[in-house]
Image (cartoon, helix red, strand yellow):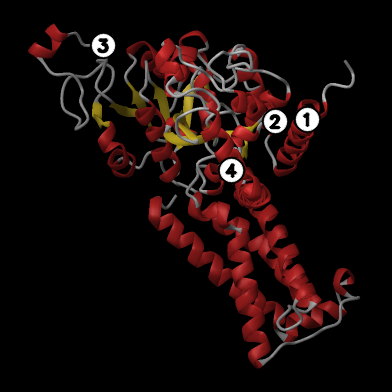
Amino acid sequence: MVSGHWYRAVSIVGTLLGAVTAVVVANHPGAQWLTTVVPVFRRLPAVVLTGDQLLLATATSSLVIVGSLLPLFKPRPRRILDTILLTQKRVVVAGFAMATVGYFDYTYPLPRSTLALTVAGLLVVFPIWFVAIGYRPGRRERAVIIGDDPDEIRDVLDATDVPVLGYVSPPSPYYSEQDRQVAPPAVADGSGNSITNDLDCLGGLSRLDEVLVEYDIDTAVLAFAQPDRAEFFGALDACYEHGVDAKVHRDHTDNVLTAASATSEEIVDIELEPWDWQDYVFKRIFDVVFAATGLFAFAPFLAVIAIAIKLDSPGPVFYSQERTAEFGETFEVYKFRSMVTDAEAETGATISDEDAGGVDPRITRVGKFLRQTHLDEVPQLWSILVGDMSVVGPRPERPELDADIRTGVVEWRKRWFIKPGLTGLAQIHGATGKQPEEKLRYDVEYVRSQSFWFDVKIVLRQVWDVLKDGSEVVFGDRGA
């Protein structure tokens, strides 16, 4: 397999040349003659493009094909059958996209006969091409362990039959201060003792990218004890960037999202990309449209809310707070202030926005109304618009609360695999931070089942709940 950036270059250039060649060959009079002979194509009129028509059709089709095959340009270790099926799926997507271009713009469409022949040819050629550049002949798979837990490293060595070349480790928590005076532990530049006598330390986490490239690694197995967020997700990001298959021992999956399968293998895959790139695009478009529409719709009321907050109690209009984001990063979230200034400082309590109820004496009169109608959340639409949040996803928590919850719910880190959201599956089912296990169950279920239409269903359900809560506040609970 061609590694790293070379794989990207080779796959893109090969796809572009293959697309151009396929269109030109399919447009050849000899190929068009097949449409009059082969039963499958017999009803399609034979059309041969020339000059500018051929040039425009070839350029447009090539761009569509390259765009449709984007997921294949990331160097990812895949089984041969998986590569074939994924490639053919993308070729079919490209075929539908080219047909759509021809339907909506008659300036440079491919004739139906040329389109059919092009897709038929690419269904054969492209799978062979991507299998060829992804195949590593003449050697066994190479693996490296990333982590600092000696027990877990030994479990990995006992469970795998893949040659493990060594391990990459952050500063190890298994060395005492006395040990440090005798010989320094493994540090970020790769110097120091080995955590285990069975393996060589190939370097620290700062050298992980170099190690993956230098040793031509296929598989990385995570074996962290108590990983820092930056170390943990930084290692996963490096694996994803270099096309390295990330795995973990089945007995140590508390911190990662693993592939949902019934396999009995002890070393299981970590899901690094649960969403297809097209789903990401649709989700981002939905987020931008939703946030922009919401901000525009609420624009006339923002000044009224701001004035009401200032008249009700002294202090700023907005309340900002650091929250945990995707991959354990943090960002600043904004809400309309609904409590007295420095409410948490006065009591020494740390408040989750889901746990602070309407009876809290620190909540102002205007704040109570804002919370009951969910209007205090409107400024978060800006966080969605700039990309810090999504409309649907696990609700972001304060880093301190995240740390507290993780001490009791060891799998809590799995929520960090996607961008936090304004609402989510846990919210529409009423699960809050007071029930972390239940909330985690819904959040992980969403991560595994997420799709564009699943997001739409959750948003519709949440909008209905918000309208219902708002009507009860304004008109009273008529069912009472």
Figure check: 282 above or below 197: below
Left or right, residue 459 beside residue 129 = right
Q: Which badge, 4 or 1, comes first in the chain's sequence? A: 4
Q: Nearer the viewer, mark 2 or mark 1?
A: 1
Residue 260 visible in image: no
**Camera-side residue: 408 or 94?**
408
Tell me how far mark 3 sits from mark 1, CA to CA: 59 Å
Q: Label for residue 373?
A: 2
Amino acid type assigned to the residue bearing label 1 in the image: Val
Q: In this figure, which residue is indicated by the disc labeled 1?
A: 474
Q: Which badge, 2 or 3, comes first in the chain's sequence? A: 3
Q: Do the numbered discs 2 and 1 sit on residues whose CB atoms are within 8 Å?
A: yes
**Quadrant showing the C terminus:** top right
Q: In this figure, which residue is indicated by the disc labeled 4?
A: 381
Amino acid type assigned to the residue bearing label 3 in the image: Tyr
Tell me how far mark 2 sits from mark 1, CA to CA: 9 Å
